[in-house]
Image: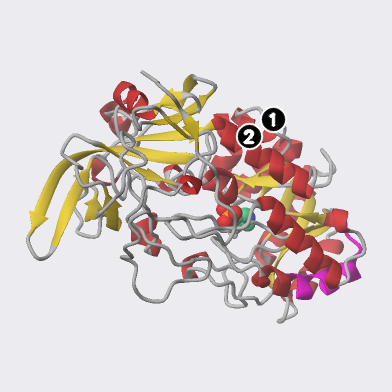
Amino acid sequence: MVRRAHAFRPATIGQVIPDPLSADCSPGPLPAGVVTAGRHGPLPSHLLPETAEVDGLGRLRIGGLDVLDLAEELGTPVFIYDEEHLRRRCRESRQAFGPRVAYASKAFLCRAMAALAHEEGCCVDVSTGGELAVALAAGVPAERLVLHGNNKSVAELEAALEAGVGRIVVDSFDEIDRLSVLSGRRNGAGRRPRVLVRVTPGVEAHTHEYVMTGQDDSKFGFGLASGDASRAVERLRHLSSGVQLVGVHAHIGSQIFALEAYERALSVLVPFFNQLELEELCIGGGLGVAYVTGETAPSITEWAQVLRQAAGAAGIADLNVLSAEPGRSIVATAGLTCYTAGTIKHLPGLRTYVSVDGGMSDNPRPVLYGSGYEAFLPREVTAPRPRVVTVVGKHCESGDVLVRDACVPEDLSVGDVLATPVTGAYGHSMASNYNKVPRPPVVFVKDGRRRVVVRRETYSDLLALEA
Ligand SMILES: Cc1ncc(COP(=O)(O)O)c(C=O)c1O
């Protein structure tokens, strides 16, 4: 029974989240974007989706629904997304960057998400034939799609040309050759593909090396400093059968808090762009989000303001040419994952392992990038979390760690639903079937209603592809 629900208030940038117990278990230097704060207090509200509330019993509600009821009904693990939060971030992006802004669907894609982004006025960025197929199946008009990829196959390019994809971001000289042959083969059928040339501006963003993409040594794009970017522009302009060069694109990396990296990128991109007289300069995605206590991140609106100022300072003639492709900043905080704690193993003097019913197959980020997460109990969201445990998955790997030093309430027990917040980006989309663990379902909640947008995989699904 809901006695009284109160909404969480989001934190502002740079704000240190108050911690009632103020014990700090995060020693050592903190990466950019982190402000010091204790970690044993209740989960900071800004790590939860925007419609999150706590009822009179201390239980978490999202989209007007009780999270524990959802976990009971749908089973665990389960990804729960706040649909209103997703919609607000898409609207904010559209407002900040205008009609060319694209939701980077690699962060999280299913038909419902693609349709939602389109309904809220965003284009959809796809980076493989598979993402293209899902976005088209969702009813997103091809004209509103942007195709990326450092190794687009002939089949993927053909599918994009056939569908009439709005923009193709060209990444290599081999791709220019393929486009040339393909558009020649089409012999004038359909309209000339509109392309952007992807440029590496030679900027190193402060983020994990696996998600840094703006430096000269990169598998993506054409180097500015090497002259490859200029050569690519020349070749695209002289393609006999013709593509239409409409813009310049750069993406310097992901999970970036220090916006100076964008300022540096724009200071070299704008002079290059200005010579070309094109209609679009896309700065890609990459805005960081807060994952753990003490972190705060700029909003999409603030990011856009910094980009506009930097582009202006670099001499851009018309700020309306500036566009972007946010992924993580739209979906990350909208989602959380609920697991069930199955075993709790206390190793005296070492650590306590809490094993849950998912793991690296539904969230590979901790294993891939050493990413940090929080954990909490949806049955007592505002409880202090004095106990430090290691939350691990059920996979046959010692590295299958979800949260290395998770602060949890004292009374965490076997059978509890344990949640990790901020799992809306690069969780479900990077999920695997390692150890033949079926992928969890995805449920959207809004205004007291829920809709399962991706069902749970079954053992039959696991066998479906075998001959
Ligand atoms: C070309 C491109 N655009 C946009 C994005 C989205 O980045 P993020 O999710 O960090 O906003 C990515 C992510 O890798 C990307 O490669």
Left or right position of 434 against 246: left
Position of the C terminus, as image quadrant, is top left
Label of residue 87 in the image: 2
Residue 54 locus on image (x, y percent): 42, 32
Secondary structure at badge 1 equals helix
Q: Is residue 165 visible?
A: no
In the rendered picture of this protein, how many numbered marks are placed on residues? 2
Position of the N terminus, as image quadrant, is top left
Label of residue 337 in the image: none
Give the colour scheme of this rendering.
Answer: secondary structure
Residue 310 locus on image (x, y percent): 78, 68
Q: Residue 206 lies in what quarter of the image?
A: bottom right
User: Would you call the spot at circle 2 few (<14 residues within 10 Å), some (14-19), or many (20 or more)?
Assistant: many
Left or right position of 241 against 208: right
Quadrant of the displayed image that contains ligand 1: bottom right
In terms of depth relative to the viewer, which is nearer, 286 or 125?
Answer: 286
Instruction: Tell me how far mark 1 sits from mark 2, CA to CA.
Output: 9 Å
**Residue at the image point whose x is 34% and y is 34% from the top:** 465
Residue labelled with disc 1: 119
Position of 151 relative to 117 (above/below):
below
Q: Residue 442 lies in what quarter of the image?
A: top left
Identity of the amino acid at label 1? Glu
Residue 167 locus on image (x, y percent): 75, 48
Whether the magenta-drawn stretch holds residue 195 is answered as no
**Residue at the image point whose x is 38% and y is 59% from the top:** 372
Secondary structure at badge 2 equals helix
Q: Is residue 7 visible?
A: yes
Badge 1 vs badge 2, beta-carbon distance below 8 Å: yes
Q: The magenta stretch spans which residues?
A: 266-279
In terms of depth relative to the viewer, which is nearer, 375 or 330?
Answer: 375
